[in-house]
Amino acid sequence: MSKIKRIGVLTSGGDAPGMNAAIRAVTRAAIYNQLDVIGIRRGYQGLIQGLFTQLKAFNVSDIIQNGGTILKTARCKEFTTPEGRKTAYDNLVKEGIEGVVVIGGDGTFTGARIFNEEHNIPFVGVPGTIDNDIYGTDYTIGYDTCLNTVVEAVDKIRDTASAHNRMFFIEVMGAEAGFIALNSGIASGAEAILIPEIKNQAAVLKQTLEDGFKRRKSSNIIIVAEGDDEGGAFKIADKVKEDFKDYDVRVIVLGHIQRGGSPSARDRVVASRFGYAAVEALLDDQKSVMVGLQNDEIALVPFRKAVKLHKEVNKNLLEIADILSI
Ligand code: F6P
């Protein structure tokens, strides 16, 4: 039986729909196990500034359906320094916090891993990022809601693209990974999808568009991940305009609407499972691990692996997208 009596919970990095459901699950699973729960506001910044508030079961009522995060979030430079992390540690000791659940992505887990190498208060991670790009988990909180937001937007754009015989380049988030682009592209029947994992796609895109033109395709939707090596939707659209002078080309950057909104059922369920599992992990005296989902089972993955190893996109999906868009 673990001796832990008081835990903290924070959200850090880019917010993702479902983070509130995870905070609720952590809080209630902890209270069920007779633990005190302290909400830490503004991520690692709040650890350093001592932004602590106790969470009771009622404090997390009526939040499961909301996007954003009631604890707020931040990207914190200071936590990347040994001095910043020492201040955070001192504040945790002062507050009597003996374990922390950190909800976030890559950067959050990198900070948590280093903190746990230096200090003995265990950190357990819950993967929350719309990018779904964390190694060791099939799924990250927020991804499903984000995909649905993108698909809804693209459906609307397709109506006008088709009405005007236009070509639309639609940029989606994914600075380093193409999961959002790839799966939203398939779900919205895009004619082409450009992702950071596949380089030098300009020539292939040109061929795809020429083939479509010959088959009398009158409108086109091209989904571009923001981190694509052509430099984003505007740059690639400019290149295409040179080759297809007769085409009426438009560019849309979907931007931060992809991070907001009420979480989907899937995001709420996964967030609830992750939050519960993270508390169990702390009670089992685990440290420096992330809870993940592997074949629909909860798995514990060391931060070391989650941040160092690269999660691969399924390149077969690109081929499927290509074949289905002829
Ligand atoms: O949440 C992940 C992510 O959406 C990336 O895909 C994107 O590049 C980044 O965050 C943008 O974040 P911010 O606007 O907070 O800098």
Image (cartoon, rainbow, N blue to C red):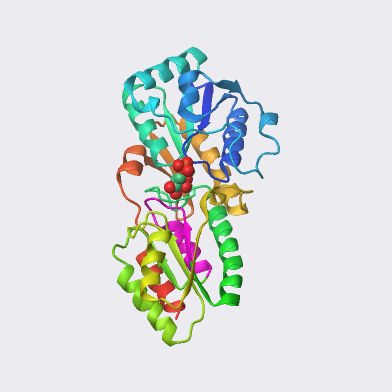
Vertical comparison of 136 with 211: above or below:
above
Image coordinates for residue 289, horizontal then vertical, percent? 39, 36
Q: Nearer the viewer, residue 15 or 20?
A: 15
* 261 relative to 224 in the view: left or right: right
Q: Is residue 86 above or below residue 122?
A: above
The residue at 66%/33% (across/down) is 60
Q: Is residue 180 magenta?
A: yes
Residue 149 against residue 70 in the figure, above or below = below
Provide the residue span drawn in magenta: 169-188
Query: Which residue is at 53% across, 68% downward?
Result: 188
Q: Is residue 127 visible?
A: no
Q: Quadrant of the C terminus?
A: bottom left
Residue 71 placed where, x, y %?
Answer: 58, 31
Which residue is depicted at the point 60% across and 71% down?
160
Q: Answer with the quarter of the image where residue 69 lies.
A: top right
- The answer to which of 142 and 278 lies nearer the viewer is 142
Where in the figure is residue 323, as x and y percent of width and height?
Answer: 42, 78
Total marks in image: 0
Q: Is residue 34 visible?
A: yes
Quarter occupied by residue 291: top left
Q: Is residue 141 left or right of residue 315?
A: right
Q: Is residue 75 above or below residue 233?
A: above
Q: Nearer the viewer, residue 141 or 4?
A: 141
Q: Residue furthest top?
A: 94
Q: Nearer the viewer, residue 274 or 228?
A: 228
Q: Position of residue 314 (x, y in %)?
A: 37, 63
